[in-house]
Image (spheres, rainbow, N blue to C red):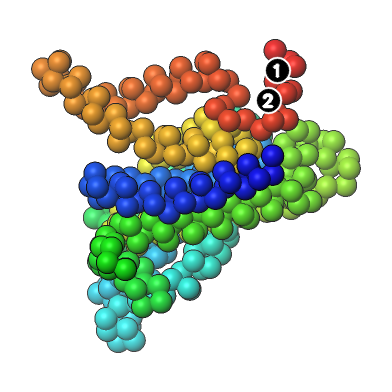
Amino acid sequence: MKNKKILSWVLGGIGLLVLPFILQYFGNAWVRIADLALLYVMLALGLNIVVGYAGLLDLGYVAFYAVGAYMFALMASPHLAETFEGFAAMFPDGLHTSIWLVIPLGMLIAACAGVLLGLPVLRLRGDYLAIVTLGFGEIIRIFVNNLDQPVNITNGPKGIGQIDSVKVFGFDLAKRHEFFGFDVASVTMYYYLFLVLVLFTVLICYRLQDSRIGRAWMAIREDEIAAKAMGINVRNMKLLAFGMGASFGGVAGAMFAAFQGFVSPESFSLMESVMIVAMVVLGGLGHIPGVILGAVLLSALPEALRYVAGPLQEMTGGRLDASILRQLLIALAMIVIMLLRPRGLWPTPERAKNLDHVS
């Protein structure tokens, strides 16, 4: 049994390593989809700490994604040097921050934003908590959308461009490279960077899940009053959940900005928050493999449905927009899945047993 488990892990690792080379044969667009899927996996795992472990329904998680993205955009582009004379004097070519500083800084700033969100909502639960966090996410989006006057910091709806690519040990991931006779595209280089970050995220999540902190979060999720009676500091544990979950969103946002080379407020809409929550719920609350499955499916499904929405649009004579059809098909797919699998596609074994017992 143990040998089979090790073999499955080895085969899975080999599959992840060769996946971008297989996808390259069908075009770099498919590798790009895999890159974005890995970013969504990181976002879903971060939100799973808040929603799945601590039981705090957060509909404004995309705000931390935006914080990380704009942090990197400001620190790795000529925007500040073009806007402020003092910056231009100190940094004539603009700031060009190293990735080794960006990742911890993105985690720190997003974690601080998560704690700031958690402070005023400590006493809220359920729907009320969801409404407040939803408002926080929209406030951040509106904030970056309008912070171009009177002082131009975020460049408003026009967004920030000319963002530096990631450079690791002298390798510019925005350029093509050749290794052992294999031509490796830029999107493939980013794939391996995102894969490493996702693996670190999964490792941290597993360590948190089995730690005293993870057990405390789950106790709060099941019964907050009982957890408080057992001596758990509910206030600090909730703030820690918000901060830890937000930190992963900050790193994912910074990587998104480097990958795209451009950020704008439209990338951080309410729909993004809803999609990330849907990934966690669809895969299985609190179960790391389930959350990964949900993130991969919901990030890849819209692209796969392009091939379905196109013919349907032609059948209606172009009266139905392809993007609207894709959203409709995604919604229908999610409704069917949740009716057939109300616990999620891959719930935790304990949760599955409890729900089976109740039903």
Q: Name the residue under label 2.
A: 352
The structure residue drawn at horizontal position 84% and vertical position 42%, both measured from the top left corner, is 228
Camera-side residue of 253 and 268: 253
Camera-side residue of 338 and 90: 338
The structure residue drawn at horizontal position 62% and vertical position 30%, both measured from the top left corner, is 347
Question: Disc 1 to disc 2, how far (Cα)?
Answer: 6 Å
The structure residue drawn at horizontal position 36% and vertical position 32%, both measured from the top left corner, is 301
Whether residue 329 sits left or right of residue 122 in the image: it is left
Farthest residue to the left: give it: 317
Percent of width and height locating residue 268: 38, 46
Checking the image for residue 292, the label placed there is none
Residue 142 in view of the camera? no
Residue 251 in view of the camera? yes
Checking the image for residue 356, the label placed there is 1
Q: Image quadrant of residue 98?
A: bottom left
Q: What residue type is labelled 2?
A: Ala
The structure residue drawn at horizontal position 33% and vertical position 57%, both measured from the top left corner, is 188
Whether residue 325 sits left or right of residue 206 in the image: it is left
Circles 1 and 2, Cβ within 8 Å, touching? The answer is: yes
Q: Residues within 10 Å of mark 1 (few under 14, many from 20)?
A: few
Q: Which amino acid does label 1 sit on?
A: Asp
Element marked by disc 1: helix
Percent of width and height locating residue 96: 35, 76
Q: Image quadrant of residue 247?
A: bottom right
Percent of width and height locating residue 58: 56, 40
